[in-house]
Amino acid sequence: MAQMLLLLLLPPPFLLLAAPTVPAEAAATASTPTLVFLLAGQSNMGGRGGATNGTWDGVVPPACAPSPRILRLSPSLRWEEAREPLHAGIDLHNVLGVGPGMPFAHALLRSWRRSGRRPAVVGLIPCAQGATPIASWSRGTPLYDRMLARARAAVARGPATRLAALLWYQGEADTIRRQDADAYTPRMEALVRDVRRDLGMPDLLVIQVGLATGQGRFVDIVREAQRRVSLRNVRYVDAKGLPVANDYTHLTTPAQVKLGNMLAAAYMAATHTH
């Protein structure tokens, strides 16, 4: 009778197998990133890969697949597993698709694995907003304030969380008027100085993307202005020549994957982690 009672109290075998234990370290990394990156600028940073015909085609290549080691800061300032479209709820009033953020994070993880280094948990902070000139990102504007608030919230979530870089892809809107194109260099340098000062990070790495396209006829002037930025610890990655969708403005999904890899290579070269 005692043996029968013991058998009744024990869980069935399938229950014993259905709930494997999760190491405490794995549980912690699922909710708090160690290295976080600001993603800011306009639509090509927000991501329009596969989304230039009025709807997103829903194609998520392996380089953009979700991973427990890639988190995003949600619109409500909570860490969650990142997935495309990464800028959902952030890049408002636009049809969103694939951007460079997810392939960037995957490329970092692959590099760390190849080098034998224990991969960090990458946190992505989407902040981009389509069709915005750089003047809309100057200190005190709503976009600037939102970016700074999200950056501060991200690092406040965990004592081991560190802001590693600002990834910046913007400038298409500044190709429309000559005066905006001519003013791009001082405006970009002011933005970098302001972000570093307000975050208390005087050496924050900034990686800016050279334009592939533009909304006006002064693309070459803005590209030259981007290259003239001469502040320390500002790197340049050139998107010119990457495949562009049939709207002649936005990068395709394969182009965004390539750009993410280029940004990761620039980050690793700047920090000597490759």
Image (cartoon, rainbow, N blue to C red):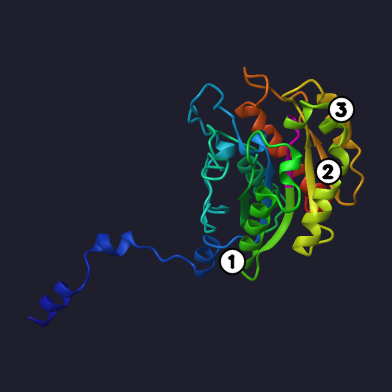
Residue 86 in the figure: left or right of residue 137: left
Helix, strand or loop for disc 3 = helix
Amino acid type indicated by mark 3: Ile
Q: Which residues are magenta?
A: 167-172
Circle 1 Cα neighbour tier, 10 Å, few/some/many (<14 / 14–19 / ≥20): some
Q: Nearer the viewer, residue 213 or 93?
A: 93
What x and y, as percent, mark residue 161?
65, 64
Helix, strand or loop for disc 2 = helix
Asked whether the residues under the numbered discs 2 and 1 touch, taking CB atoms below 8 Å apart as contact, a structural biologist would say no
**Label placed on residue 221:** 3
Circle 2 Cα neighbour tier, 10 Å, few/some/many (<14 / 14–19 / ≥20): some
The residues tagged by marks 3 and 1 sit, at their Cα atoms, a distance apart of 41 Å
Point out the tag, 2 or 3, that comes first from the N-terminus: 2
Q: Which residue is mark 2?
A: 187
* Mark in front: 2 vs 3: 2
The residues tagged by marks 2 and 1 sit, at their Cα atoms, a distance apart of 31 Å
Residue 34 in the figure: left or right of residue 174: left
Amino acid type indicated by mark 1: Arg
Residue 65 in the figure: left or right of residue 184: left
Helix, strand or loop for disc 1 = loop
The residue depicted at 76 percent of the width and 25 percent of the height is 176
Point out the tag, 3 or 1, that comes first from the N-terminus: 1
Circle 3 Cα neighbour tier, 10 Å, few/some/many (<14 / 14–19 / ≥20): some
Total labels: the figure holds 3
The residue depicted at 53 percent of the width and 39 percent of the height is 85
| Quarter holding residue 9 | bottom left
What x and y, as percent, mark residue 21?
41, 66
Q: Which residue is mark 1?
A: 157
- State the residue lying farthest toward the bottom: 2
